[in-house]
Amino acid sequence: MNSPFHKFSYFLTALLLFLSSCGTSYQPERDTGEEQQEQIEQNDSVPTDGVLETVTWNLEWYGSGFSGPTNQELQTQNIVKVIDSLDADLFAFQEVANQGALDNIVQFMDGYSGFTASHVPRDQDMAFVYNTNAIDSLEAGPINDVRPEYQNDWSYYWASGRTPLFFRFNYTYENTTREFYAVVIHGKANTSNYAESYERRQKAAEGLYYYLKDNKSDANIILMGDYNDDVDQSIYYVEENNDRVYQETPYDKFVKDIDNFEVITKVLSDAGESASINYEDIIDHITISDELFDEHVQNSTAIHDPRSYIEDYGNTTSDHLPVWAKFDITTPSKSVVTTRK
């Protein structure tokens, strides 16, 4: 009597003969992830031109695997396509899962390098990616050495330990080198207890303001990121006599100190523009120190909208749009400039 194994072997042999007679051969299942990545074109390197172009962009849980766009390969392809359209020198990203996820983007960016905020304990790292043709990395790390009144709850104020990430670098064009101090932040979202979330954003912004004033008073500061609040007024409101009374922006220290800082994206708030999908207020902002007032290229602060060339952008790529600004380092400056001879 034939064993069950022999019966199965006869059946399998007959099946293979049948498929062969039909002109059909076995084909292994394709790895759609590799196939998708093969379709991603390598971005060309970007030469230095004397204008530092900066972008802040929330990539919506990129690389997390449990939230955000469901097709990460398509999300990667779209992100790389947007980056290629921008040709910026410095990208400040939010919501990148880890260094491996960031590397998955940077591998398609010729002449770029990048790093994440490894001190952030969750899959919502901030990150910097920079053009190595123009930028030399000097130093990077978390900002934690704040005044004592903010020290104990500093990580709590920023939510999930997302304390600010700084990046000190030199930008060089021809014989001129300028040092910059960039900071990327991701403020506490307006969730659950709205009043508490607002207070946490307030404390976080105040602590950072005083840190920069105390320690970086002469630096060329560019403060970029998902502020998770607007800067004309807060997205948080209280009900008074059946009316919504919107509170003061938690970033009011930066907004009001016009001698030392300028929130250059406030013009977008004042114009009623938004860099979010299906959200009216703009919460992605860029603030600069007075050392860069003259270098800031007027009218360069804008929202880049990829929805004209990325199909179903909000579901496939991100729920935020990139916001960018440019700085001309060939402009005479009040900050320290190194000239090579």
Image: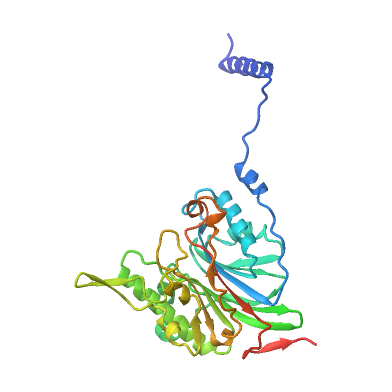
| Residue 334 in the image: above or below residue 52 | below
Q: As drawn, is 111 to the left or to the right of 10?
A: right
Residue at coordinates 48% horizontally, 54% vertically from top-left? 314
Q: As drawn, is 110 to the left or to the right of 73?
A: right
| Residue 40 in the image: above or below residue 213 | above
Between 329 and 126, which is closer to the camera in this rendering? 329
Q: Could you say where residue 292 lies in the image, as x and y percent from the top left?
A: 58, 84
| Residue 289 in the image: above or below residue 120 | below
Displayed quadrant of residue 139: bottom right
Q: Kindly give the residue lying farthest to the top in the view shown.
A: 1
- Whether residue 139 can be seen here: yes
Between 159 and 321, which is closer to the camera in this rendering? 321
Of the 4 image quadrants, the one containing the C terminus is bottom right
Between 109 and 29, which is closer to the camera in this rendering? 109
Q: Could you say where residue 89 lies in the image, as x and y percent from the top left?
A: 65, 70
Q: As drawn, is 202 to the left or to the right of 293?
A: left
Q: Could you say where residue 211 lies in the image, as x and y percent from the top left?
A: 49, 85
Displayed quadrant of residue 166: bottom right
Of the 4 image quadrants, the one containing the N terminus is top right
